[in-house]
Amino acid sequence: MISETYSLLVNGNSYQVVDGHPSESLLWVLRERLELSGSKNACEEGECGSCTVLVDGEIVCSCLVLAASAVGREITTIEGLGSEDEISDVQKAFVDAGAVQCGFCTPGLLVAIDQLLNTDPDPDDLTVREAISGNLCRCTGYGRILEAVRIASKNRKAQNQEEQGK
Amino acid sequence: MSPLQTVDTATKGPRIGESAIRPDGVPKVKGEFVFSNDLRHPDMIWGGTLRSPHPSARIVSINTTPALKMTGVYAVLTSEDLDGMPLYGLEHPDQPVLADGVVRFQGEPVAIVAADHPDNVRLALEAIDVEYELIEPLSDSKLAQENEAIHPDGNLFREININYGNSQEEGEITVEGTYEVGMQDQAPLGTESGMAVPSEDGGIDLFVSTQWLHADRDQVAACLNLPPEKVRLTLAGVGGAFGAREDISLHIHLCLLAMRTGKPIKMSYSRTESFHGHVHRHPAQMWYRHHAKSDGTLIRIEARLLLDGGAYASTSSAVLANATCFAAGPYRVPNVEIYGAVVRTNNPPCGAMRGFGCVQVCFAHEAQMDKLAVELGMDPVELRVKNALEPGDQIITGQTITGTAPVAEVIETCAQHSSSVGPASQQMELPGGAGRTADPKHIVRGEAIAVGFKNLMFSEGFDDFSTASCQLLDGVATITSACAEVGQGFVTLAQQIVREILGVEEVILAPASTASVGSAGSTSASRQTWMSGGAVKSACDAVRIKLLSRIAESHDLDVESLVIVDGGIASLSSEFSISLKEATSDLVEAEEVYRHVPTFPLDENGQGNAHVSFVFSAHRAVVDVDQELGLVKVVELITSQDVGRVLNPLQLQGQLEGGAAQGLGLAVMEEINVVDGRILNPSFTDYLLPTALDMPPVEIAALIEQPEPNAPFGAKGVGEPPAISSTAAIASAVRNATGLDLHRVPIRPTDIVFPERNDND
């Protein structure tokens, strides 16, 4: 087999991928080689969104991206949300709103919603539904997930107003 | 005050009745929670399964030699390598661990491989040469009973006759119908996965996602020819279940490969393999005739039910019992003749899925009630309320409802709740969404209500129990239970129960494992809140009594005067008080086994006290239908549910919304298409799950809180009802919108556009 060594920039850290096979997906490399197993594999054909990560700020299904094609690009995974000590506002809203049941879809949804709120801080219901329609959840029926987005969006808006008022 | 009474204990942690937050919520949102397919071990190798591409064939030969010679391959096993029990099964062992000379469904495991890397596993699987001699598959369940047996146990898993009342009276009004339910997949997002690690004592440790550790353990041990204590199963993070994990999947295979290679081994199914690798919801064909007086009083129901069990037994027997016992719906019916059968075919095996037999018949009996209402010229809500079961009534098995039965309440509250949706205002909200071309002028709106009911816990005399232990040390409680947390939130509830009874703040939940505690039974049948909740409560009650007795003795106090309050123990008759931390510097512990009241088998007429308790729900659906394109958009779901008592409002809401989504899926989207025994759509590209754009808001009209006698805290299980009456309500709303006699779910676009074609099915 052809193998290569290359590096990937994930959540601001540089990782060496040693003896990587060029056919390996970004999801596989994240999970199995870099041991960043927060990104999940529920279909591995781009239908479920469990493996959602950002590549240069764009949402992708990491199961459909070749890891080697992400060299030199900024990759953000669920492990990159929040800080070491504190979960992010969207993560906290998920926990508080009951948006987590089995939790398998959760990391992919959080990456997608974080990106949505970063680009559109005050999305309407339909916009949120459209934005997460590529992320399947089998447990929740989406009700508490949508509620979590409303909470996070409201909190961000309040925080922005407070900062502008200062 | 007796120590047995629960006292008002002021603690910081949320107790029973509050929206406590999941203890595993933070690890799950951080991506740190370890699911079964996140497991790894430094010496780990990988396993894979060779499956039959044919639904029915004789195996002429298997040549594993080329695969064994390949790079990185450690082992290739076939049925010849088994030295334990060659068959397994949850109710009845009839399914080969590895096919022995014959395959009976597409996807049946034929050989298993262990290799150093998943790529080498795949290459080795491809290198195994199996010669098959094809047999015409038995794919039509209607022909199963007359067909030559396709298994030594025959083609009939079970048949049940329910004969209740003795009148053959014809009703003034009769309505008749034939109904069909397609095969639904549980589709938990986490596929089957796990890791087996051989241990030094010659036994094995298996870390796996499952619904029932001890039932798995016993089957695995028998197939490995090991004593059960040498097979230790520990629950690994479970990515949803919904019935799909009640049966064995890769458990035995993993252990066989680990034992053979002496190495830790991991296996994880692909989505396609998962579709072939677990049981599904039984497809059903149902004929009904309802008889009523002209005032709407039901006087007789006749029905014939046929469930397709697929190739192996799984839980088919219990599913049929539910389908027949609940076939008449939550109504008073004085005379009933029902025949039900579940048969073996060369289709994919079917077993447990949320709602378990009640989903299929609910769709049919509610369609019948609608038909009857039309014939009578009566309001469908009024008809249902008129016939609604009440406490003290008998169901059709002759069992008297001794607990609560707020049937009229769920119907009326659901029917009266005002709708909050207006007409669709954007293309995206129309049937078909943005990608389709629905024309608002072609859209018709419909609305309908449906009611369902189901048993809680296991029935028919099964010895159903749960075990839990509680250890209280230095003010910290540790609960040990083998209850499988699959996402439903038992971990949250267990903590709430402990806080409620012991007044402690910190509650540790030990890993669920067969090595540390007895069985908790299955996470299914809406039973864990009652059963394992009951076991945790019993263990905490026992610890509480022991603790208070010990304090009373050591401080020369009257135990009756002691209460747990404010994180401490106080005397009501003196100044005495002590913190819980101090009072438990020596360990206090108890283990309890909780059992529900005994149940009994059904007799030859399907009569008997076979069930523990009943739960009821109603759904009202509002749908928009594009009749030209056959597209359906469910715009609103309203529900009322009989819950006994609300223990955690937030988690309850999650169950109601999530179950309704699965019901919506069955109504208009989800079907495993099986043709000649082959699954045509084993992927998320072709098997469609509801997305956030498909799922409407779920309005909770009412949670009927009538505490159930004998239930811990008065609470009924809540998981299954949302998946039962939702499908029926949506289908009925589509009938209401279109005026079509839609007698099959899922409703397909062609059923709406070419209704005449389906009448000829």
Image (spheres, coloured by chain):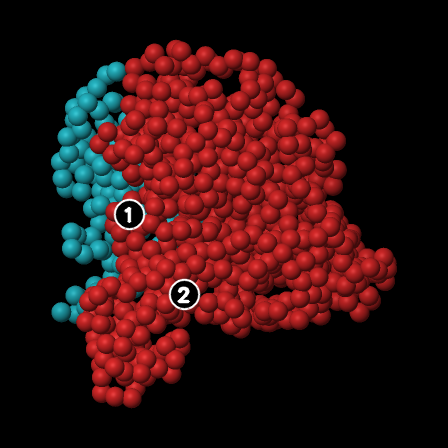
The residue beneath circle 1 is B33
Chain that appears red: B
Q: Rate crowding at label 1 as few (under 14), some (14 to 19) or many (20 or more) other CA atoms within 10 Å.
A: many
Q: Is residue B682 left or right of residue B508?
A: right
Residue B641 is situated, as x and y percent measured from the top left of the image, at 54, 65
Of callouts 2 and 1, the N-terminal one = 1
Judging by the rendered image, the residue that carries numbered circle 2 is B538
Q: Chain of mark 2?
A: B
> Measured along the vertical axis of the image, is residue B676 above or below residue B582?
above
Q: Quadrant of the N terminus of chain B?
A: bottom left
Who's the residue at 46% across and 32% down the image? B223
- x then y, percent, for residue A162: 19, 68
Evaluate whether residue B580 shows in this view.
Answer: yes
Q: Are marks 2 and 1 on the same chain?
A: yes
Mark 2: few/some/many CA within 10 Å (<14, 14-19, 20+): many
Colour in which the image shows chain A: cyan
